[in-house]
Amino acid sequence: MSSVYSEIILDYYRHPRNKGTLDHPHIKAKDSNPLCGDIIEMQLELDGNDSVKDVRFNGQGCAISQASASMLTELVKGKKLDDVRSISKEEILSLIGGQLSAVRLKCALLSLKVLKTGVYTYLGSMSNSKEELSGL
Amino acid sequence: MSSVYSEIILDYYRHPRNKGTLDHPHIKAKDSNPLCGDIIEMQLELDGNDSVKDVRFNGQGCAISQASASMLTELVKGKKLDDVRSISKEEILSLIGGQLSAVRLKCALLSLKVLKTGVYTYLGSMSNSKEELSGL
Amino acid sequence: MIEGLDRYYREYNANVFRGVYQISEEATAAYETARKRIAELINAKDPSEIIFVRGTTEAINLVAHSWGRSNIGLGDSVMLTEMEHHSNIVPWQLLARDKGAQLKYVGISDEGRLLTEEFHGYLENGGVKLFAVTQVSNVLGTVNPVREMVREAHRYNCRVLVDAAQSVPHIAVDVQDLDCDFLAFSGHKMCGPTGIGVLYAKRDLLEKMEPYQGGGEMIREVHLYEASFKDPPFKFEAGTTDISGAIGLGVAVDYLSKVGLRNIRNHERDLTAYALDKLGKLKQMRIYGPADPDTRGGVISFNLADIHAHDMASLLDEDGIAVRSGHHCAQPLMERLGVAATTRASFYLYNTEGEIDRLVESLERAGRVFKI
Amino acid sequence: MIEGLDRYYREYNANVFRGVYQISEEATAAYETARKRIAELINAKDPSEIIFVRGTTEAINLVAHSWGRSNIGLGDSVMLTEMEHHSNIVPWQLLARDKGAQLKYVGISDEGRLLTEEFHGYLENGGVKLFAVTQVSNVLGTVNPVREMVREAHRYNCRVLVDAAQSVPHIAVDVQDLDCDFLAFSGHKMCGPTGIGVLYAKRDLLEKMEPYQGGGEMIREVHLYEASFKDPPFKFEAGTTDISGAIGLGVAVDYLSKVGLRNIRNHERDLTAYALDKLGKLKQMRIYGPADPDTRGGVISFNLADIHAHDMASLLDEDGIAVRSGHHCAQPLMERLGVAATTRASFYLYNTEGEIDRLVESLERAGRVFKI
Ligand SMILES: Cc1ncc(COP(=O)(O)O)c(C=O)c1O
Ligand SMILES: Cc1ncc(COP(=O)(O)O)c(C=O)c1O
């Protein structure tokens, strides 16, 4: 009976932090998981030092995708873009905890994929990062 | 080593009887075996009593189809149309002798099918005979 | 079924319709026997009305292409319903776009039944050349009154295609009684293999239809600049067909016939009644589709409280219970129901009341995990 | 191969890409692994360039429909050869008829080689949008210089489709080296199941191509009046695909790769040399196709005296030897050769010289029966 649906996940699902949109985001990216229909949009506002001043996510879908997106927003807040770029899947998965099947992994990592797509596009290095993104 | 290719079959294949066409046939029918490409045409000339006065076959294909067509022409010559109509597959097969596989059966019976199609069409009873013909 | 397939591979692995030699004749015979069995199952007049395809989707695309392109033109309409599977929507969208035709959708009631007034209205307005409808909804379970709708449509010269993917495996289907013009179903939903399915069409329609794919086996003669085609069904089966799939489907049909489709239907109806009752007692449970087990099939779509369907499937999977979740290839229906996804449990001949009890227990646990 | 299929049915019989539950994920993974294996076999740049279809015939029809309809118009031409299989003729006839395009046929020499002057001539005359050519003739055995022809065709902006039904199972095929735009082959000719085959196409072409069939799994979103489609390869795989077939093909590819296509080719070349030598010594024997075993594959078509090919197949069958006889779905080639049919022996990795000796003995007996 060890469910991935821990208290923490449920809490972020029912009471998402940083959900919504920003007025003047520097970075905006959106994607969906065609298999599940989960949708995630990420918005970032930067300060002069290319650090994340503010962040919001928006979307709909299962508890895993929505909770992990919300957790990710907390993780990136205040970080330098360069550090955001190097967030690994493992970090996300350890935030979620529990064992995920291959399909649910896609739900868990959707927000990271969206975030990185946004960051790479902003930095103009989208093309050389396709491979990494396809691994998410 | 009991081959269906008896001396008789070979003889009819190499020296077909009644091969050719008639000048004024009353009955003419032609069909092919799409699987093998065998083609047989049958022509019949009748006398006033609806008996077969003369008969020819024409065509190309394997020894089985050509020999059996030639044998069939000999069988029907002089017969009443009603008797032609009642020729059975078994009669043809006993003329050929030997064991035929399902596919070669189609070769052996092609001429009978063509002949009966011609006769039924002539007698105006084509439609009620479709079932019999599809069994050939 | 697996045994049937296997036997084919070991004994008959030769190309159907080709070669003069023995082994190939046996494969051809088994292939044609499968066709005959399927014709009997749905009471087709003749085996030549049975065309082997990859599945329901290909069957519908074949009709859209071979019949649709010659019979549906500018300003004509194709009538569908709001409960169709994508496979019975997208081919008609593509056709409509190419031909300048229109799509009309018969809506559904809140209980998940077709709105017959809309159906009649569209017919009366004229120009409807085809009605393509599912016999049993794969989401709602609704059994549509296809027989009556066919009679009505024919009065307006409108042909009817029945998507029977969810009906042929579960209820006795008689194409002559339905009098439908086309009917499509898939092997993998009826204990058969994937990759094989059936298009039934009335013989006179098949005779007039253009070929679908060109190639080996569907031709009579090929010359450099022209070709003539075989009679149906072969005209529509280009290339090396899925012989093993067809034979496997034949074996599955034998099996279903032996069990008896009336028995299957009765068993499913009883299970569905039991499940509707048990599930209906759970609080915050929303079940979609008709409540009366006599007029619905054995699929039950639901949502429990605010638990997303994918989370529900994962939770049930943790207890070893396999269900499907998502839009079930029926996004327009999801929009109509106002949900992103549903969880769907489906019952077949091998399921038991005990399994439904386990499902209910697992749903209760899900409720506790999500603290609803 | 049978084991691979079987395992699938027992363990993974769930619909690929559907359902969230475990069993289905494994089927999806096995299906995608098969795609990867096939991409590696023919050295495609990316697995997304591999589309699962029913066979070579469907692959060619897919190209004719999805690429052909948008890229070939009134007055354009499609260039074929006189040695094509019906599957690589009829789809282009249907397209040409619908679009008012022309077909041009590259002729063959008496030894069964393409007339390269004609090939160049057609290209120079202009308007040739596609060259569709078999890599290895299924009747003559001829191995065509596809790599060189692709280079030449591309100079004239002419795309090239390679019918690889007879090459992929027998010789090492490298699509990047060939630089062909499309390539098609079938599972059942390479120790795989019937009902599954592959279309390879360059990614940039796939991205621009229209979908072929519409339905489940190939869509991204469906609304009542419009739909958007997934990226290749999924866009071209509508409906429940032949998962078991694809997995079975993957297993076959593994097997062939393990044996090694260079070893297979060498073995076949040796057998072919041996057979050409032995058969050539029989009197009144006519062998079609190139005499040099280095530039031909392991099929040998022949006729002995006036023995009709079907009689020959029956005679050999009486001795337990399976050959094919007929037009081999290449009627235009039969017309060119001036025969109604040929008998064809084909050699594969499992054949031996001993079997060729038995074939020769049986041919001698046939000669005696027919008193030639
Ligand atoms: C050269 C060639 N092309 C095409 C085909 C057609 O393949 P399939 O019948 O598997 O579609 C074949 C096989 O019969 C072939 O040998
Ligand atoms: C009602 C209905 N129609 C069509 C289909 C499509 O069938 P297939 O994917 O086998 O082509 C399905 C199955 O998914 C279905 O349930």
Image: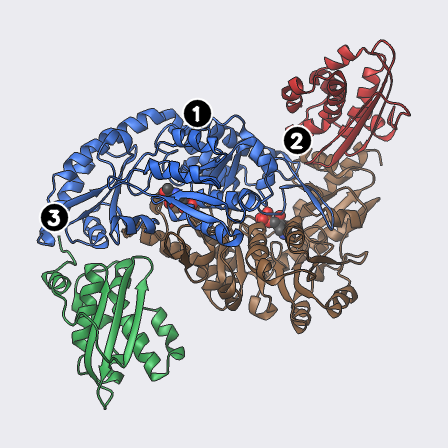
Chain colours: A red, B green, C brown, D blue
- Label 3 packing within 10 angstroms: few (<14), some (14-19), many (20+): some
Q: Chain of mark 3?
A: D
- What type is the residue that disc 1 sits on? Asp
Q: Position of residue A104 (x, y in %)?
A: 69, 29
- What type is the residue that disc 2 sits on? Val
Residue at the right extreme, as displayed: A23
Depth check, front residue: B59 or C184? B59
Determine which residue is flagged by label 3.
D365
Left or right: D164 with respect to B16? right
Determine which residue is flagged by label 1.
D177
Determine which residue is flagged by label 2.
A103
Q: Quadrant of residue B103?
A: bottom left
Residue C53's disc is none
At horizontal 60% and vertical 59% (from top left) the residue drawn is: C68
Q: Quadrant of the N terminus of chain A?
A: top right
Give the mark, 3 or 1, whose residue is nearer the N terminus. Answer: 1
At horizontal 26% and vertical 54% (from top left) the residue drawn is: D340
Left or right: A84 with respect to D241? right
Q: Quadrant of the C terminus of chain A?
A: top right
